[in-house]
């Protein structure tokens, strides 16, 4: 199988690109990467995007590239729209011309949090601009007629260098012995990057199609998560200070969205990790990382 991964310099794209056991191509944007079958491409540039897909002729495009800073998406709506909607349209239009399938990475923020738990067929409704643009991307994918997977995920973590990666931030601050204020009112289904990559590739290999909730199996708030990280890595947890997010009044609303991942585990035949299992995995793979 030939795959083309977008956002190959990002957290998820890197993992998928480096672990997929297939003929693979990748595109990055700002972060220069060198290696075989890697090239720079601004996905907002429509003609270049379509012509690259026509040149590669992938069986699947795994579209990880996005504007992922939720507060930035609230402040710069035009730029967020260009990356999350127009670039997705370009990728989809390229796939249409090559009969490629697409795996589009989406988010739990397509929901508003008014339900206790969300399954794949539940009605969407967004409360922030990031969610709105990602949902618009889903609509483009669904209405295109090309075979698709929409993989909705939440709070990716693992051994990555991304400055916003929650586990990495906690471990770095602990090292520096700095205090860290952590919100008690932001809830997530934290998702280990190694785990989502493997599960997503399995869904693709098994020729599954449709919408999937590819999220971790725990639903916890950021403070509880930070304490678990601290305990798992044997830290003195006194540097973690619980606070309510209203102290900082962030630009984007964060609804409390509990994702049901039953369908994904059943169709992939794979387990989506709890936070304890994910942290155990990280500890077992920390050589050269911490
Ligand atoms: N991170 C999370 O917790 C989370 C939660 C829910 C859903 N998701 C979704 O999961 C996917 C992967 O997230 P991630 O955390 O891996 O993202 P990330 O680390 O922020 O990476 C996003 C990538 O998109 C690329 N990109 C941005 N604008 C581009 C453009 N105009 N043309 C080409 N590439 C462009 C960037 O390339 P350069 O680095 O080269 O600039 C970057 O590598 C995204 O679709 C995101 O919406 C993520």
Image: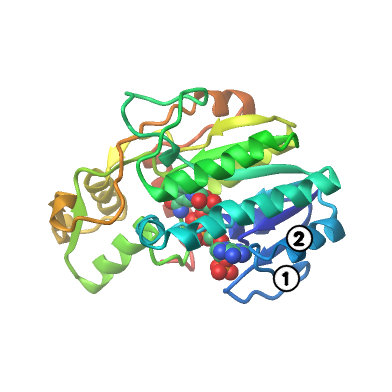
Could you give the CA–CA distance between mark 2 and mark 1, rounded to whole angstroms?
8 Å
- Measured as percent of width and height from the top left, residue 75 is found at 36, 61
- Residue at 61% x, 55% y is 86
Q: Circle 2 — which element?
A: strand
Instruction: Give the mark nearest the N terminus, 2 or 1.
Output: 2
Residue holding disc 1? 39
| Image coordinates for residue 208, horizontal then vertical, percent | 70, 30
Q: Give the residue at mark 2.
A: 25
Seen in the picture, residue 210 relative to 153 is either above or below; the reply is: above
User: In the drawing, what numbered circle is on residue 91?
Assistant: none
The residue depicted at 42 percent of the width and 31 percent of the height is 259
Q: Is residue 139 left or right of residue 115?
A: right
Residue 248: percent from left, percent from top: 18, 58
In the rendered image of this protein, does residue 263 appear above or below residue 5? above
Q: Is any atom of residue 47 visible in this view?
A: yes
* Picture quarter with the C terminus: bottom left
Task: From the viewer's perspective, tell me whether residue 81 is left or right of residue 91.
Answer: left
> Is residue 227 positioned above or below 39 on the image?
above
């Amino acid at each position: 199988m030939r795959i083309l991964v977008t956002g190959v310099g990002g957290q998820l794209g890197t993992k998928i690109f480096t672990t997929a056991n297939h003929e693979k191509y990748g595109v990055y944007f700002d972060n220069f990467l060198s290696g075989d079958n890697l090239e720079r491409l601004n996905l907002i540039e429509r003609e270049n995007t379509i012509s690259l897909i026509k040149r590669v002729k992938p069986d699947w495009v795994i579209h990880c590239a996005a504007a992922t800073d939720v507060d930035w998406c609230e402040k710069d709506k035009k730029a967020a729209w260009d990356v999350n909607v127009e670039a997705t349209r370009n990728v989809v239009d390229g796939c249409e011309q090559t009969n490629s399938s697409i795996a589009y990475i989406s988010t739990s923020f397509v929901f508003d949090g008014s339900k206790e738990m969300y399954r794949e067929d539940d009605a969407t409704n967004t409360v922030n601009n990031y969610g709105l643009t990602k949902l618009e991307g889903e609509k483009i994918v669904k209405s295109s007629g090309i075979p698709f997977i929409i993989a909705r995920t939440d709070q990716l973590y693992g051994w990555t260098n991304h400055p916003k990666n929650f586990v990495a931030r906690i471990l770095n601050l602990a090292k520096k012995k700095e205090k860290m204020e952590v919100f008690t009112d932001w809830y997530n289904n934290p998702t280990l990057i190694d785990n989502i990559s493997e599960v997503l590739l399995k869904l693709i290999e098994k020729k599954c199609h449709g919408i999937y909730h590819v999220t971790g199996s725990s639903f916890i708030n950021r403070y509880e998560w930070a304490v678990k990280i601290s305990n798992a890595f044997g830290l003195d947890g006194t540097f973690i200070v619980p606070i309510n997010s209203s102290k900082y009044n962030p630009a984007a609303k964060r609804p409390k969205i509990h994702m049901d991942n039953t369908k994904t585990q059943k169709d992939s035949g794979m387990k989506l990790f709890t936070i304890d299992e994910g942290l155990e995995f990280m500890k077992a793979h920390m050589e050269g990382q911490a």
